[in-house]
Amino acid sequence: MSLVVAKNLKKTYVAGDITVNAIQGVDFSIESASFVSFVGPSGSGKSTLLNMIGCLDPPTEGTLQVADNDITRLDRREAARFRGENIGFVFQDFNLIPVLTVFENVEYPLQMVQNWPAGKRRERVQELLEAVGMADQGNKYPGQISGGQKQRVAVARALVTKARLVLADEPTANLDRETATRIIDLMKKMRDEFDTTFIFSTHDPKVVKNAEIIYTLEDGKLIKSQGDNGGHHV
Amino acid sequence: MYNIFKLAARNLKRYKRRTFLTSMLITLGVVAVLMFVSISGSFKTMMIGQITDSMLGHLQIHRKGYLASIDSLPLNRNLSSKQVAKIEQVLVDIDAVDTYTMRIKLGAMFSNFAETTNIRLNAVLPEQELNTVPLLSERIIQGQAAGLIEKGEILIPELIAKGMRVKIGDSIVLVANNKDGSVNGLTLQVRGILEGISGPGGRDGVIHLEDAKTLLRITGVEISEIAIRLKDMNRLPQTYADLTAKLSSIKNQQGQPVFEVHTWEKLSPFFNIAKMIDLMTFFIRIMLVAIVLVSIMNVMIMAVYERINEIGTIAAIGTLPARILGIFMVEGFLLGVLGTAIGTIISLVAIASMNASKISFDFGRQTGLLLAPTISAGEVVVVVLTVIGIAVVASLQPAYKAAKMDPIVALRHV
Ligand SMILES: Nc1ncnc2c1ncn2[C@@H]1O[C@H](COP(=O)(O)OP(=O)(O)OP(=O)(O)O)[C@@H](O)[C@H]1O
Ligand SMILES: [Mg+2]
């Protein structure tokens, strides 16, 4: 069954008398546990699309289903709750909370979003830190680790709640090529380990190559899709 | 909840200098209020104590109209024995009344055999008088204080002692007109010198009631005023109302009330000073509230502005708006608690050390009054709760702004 289904999805921004048709009617469906990338030139609508899938920005038109929920008409609270339960986020600028340690950053969604009990929390955070190779850095603060390490922590934070879908808008834009590749490899490994669906955007062709399904956007339209549309494969 | 506090505390630590400055401002305000309340409060209590316990008593009863003409110390407005008996009947029934004393107030000529001057006198029964105004004996700056006064003796105010060059043991003569206008004289021995205090009656001499009766040729009972001491000063308003109600029901043939009752507040001009002090305390409190409100709001607005990206992040990953509101409110709350805690500790230590170092001050002609500032636990609690409450209120608006921020807009903010 498809995890994300978009039909005739449109997003129009109106600012004063300027109207921008950022997404102009796209259709796609993404299967569970797939590893998907949206690519396209700057301004093509990648972020807009990811924000809609991530329940951060409601579509102007069309339908969008994520994990069997129609997410086109959620209010702010419902959307926040839905994100907290189903979606993990990885950001371009890592966006770790500077006053919390690596461990506490990964723990944050379990404590402040999902209210896990302390014991289970510790176990789960440790598991994730090990999975991303940051287990020995738990007591450091974000200011004390490198960009690549920060993004590993961010991936751990996105996965810790057992989210079914992780969205990453340009997760490697602030990393050097080698680190970028490692982060994408890590995400793929996480997909294999936890069966989580990953959707990320990039305009780096080297990074794109690692995706299993590639959607190409241009001027808010899907102009190409490559890879296995039937879901994830071995 | 614990985590919200941890997050708030860490963020306060992150901007150490700002946190320090803001909490110092609050500390300063709290110290100012607590110190002012405590010092002015103890000054007030002491002055009121001085006035009520060495001179006026808490309440006074006179014949109707006496107080209006008290400057001339009219003997024809004294209470008769029947009237005194009625008052005593009423007083017995009022539980709050501790004790009372009866006085004849009179004006006389005071002569040291060389010069003559005017003197105002309180004629008293020493035992009753000391029970009602126990601090009176402390005002005896020369001579034997114990026992206050005996027949044939006089306590003279220090101004007259100086002006007339009279010493303890000297004989003096009092000459007075009685009610009918005839004149009589009485020789008395100076027993002691009385310190003057501000307010009406503060510069009166003291003689024994029996001597006054001899001097004024009074047979039977005639009393100018009855001064009353209460068991607890806090019961003053209630007792006053009670006493007024009971005494005003006693009317003369013309249907007019016979008696008048006054509290010390009506009798002493210091009451206005006391009210001034209360007013100043009120304004200082208002200033504290303003300081806390403005400083916390300012800091919290800045805190929200600086952390827009962080707010976007936690909102995106699913933190509910109410919790974001909580994070910032707790931060303001902790800032208030920090400033208040330090301020309260400093104030209490300062008050304790002021008491330990026995600072004295002068008021009017009185010197060497000991400053013993005290503050009630209730007062501290009120100030603490006010400041913390205001801190929370002040962070409400910025916190609300953070809570309703759109995650996409916040994340895009640089
Ligand atoms: N809030 C907004 N208001 C108005 N226009 C917007 C808004 N957000 C995006 N747009 C416009 O929508 C279009 C798509 O923007 P989007 O950010 O999705 O592109 P992108 O593919 O992510 O680009 P980049 O690679 O530079 O990140 C652009 O023309 C952009 O200017
Ligand atoms: Mg973008």
Image (spheres, coloured by chain):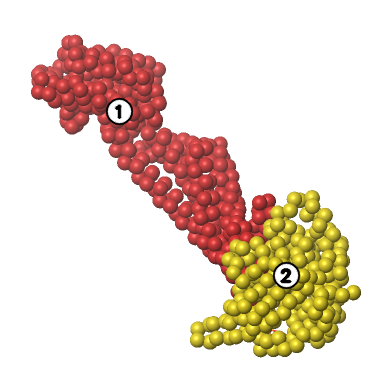
Give the CA distance from mark 2 to mark 1: 74 Å
Residue, far right: A234
Is the residue at mark 2 in contact range of ligand 2, meaning its CB lies under 8 Å from it? no
Do marks 2 and 1 share a chain? no
Residue B344 is tagged as none
Find out whether the residues at labels 2 and 1 contact each other: C-beta distance under 8 Å. no
**Label 2: element kind:** strand
Q: Which chain is red?
A: B
Estimate the x, y position of residue A43 in percent, counting from the top left: 66, 86
Say few, some or many: other residues with alpha carbon within 10 Å of mark 1 (under 14 / 14 to 19 / 20 or more).
Answer: some
**Left or right of residue A7: residue A139:** right
Q: Identify residue for label 1.
A: B240
Instruction: Tell me if residue B223 comes above or below residue B34 in the rendering.
Output: above
Q: Colour of chain A?
A: yellow
Quarter holding the C terminus of chain A is: bottom right
Residue name at image x 9 percent, y 23 percent? B254
Quadrant assignment for ligand 1: bottom right
Chain of the residue where label 1 is placed in the rendered structure: B
2 vs 1, front mark: 2
Q: Which mark is residue A89?
A: 2
Residue at screen point 43% across, 39% down: B41
The picture places residue A203, in percent across and down from the top left corner, at 76, 85
Amino acid at pointer 2: Phe
Q: Position of residue A9 (x, y in %)?
A: 64, 79
Side of A195 where A108 appears, left or right: left
Q: Which chain does tag 2 point to?
A: A
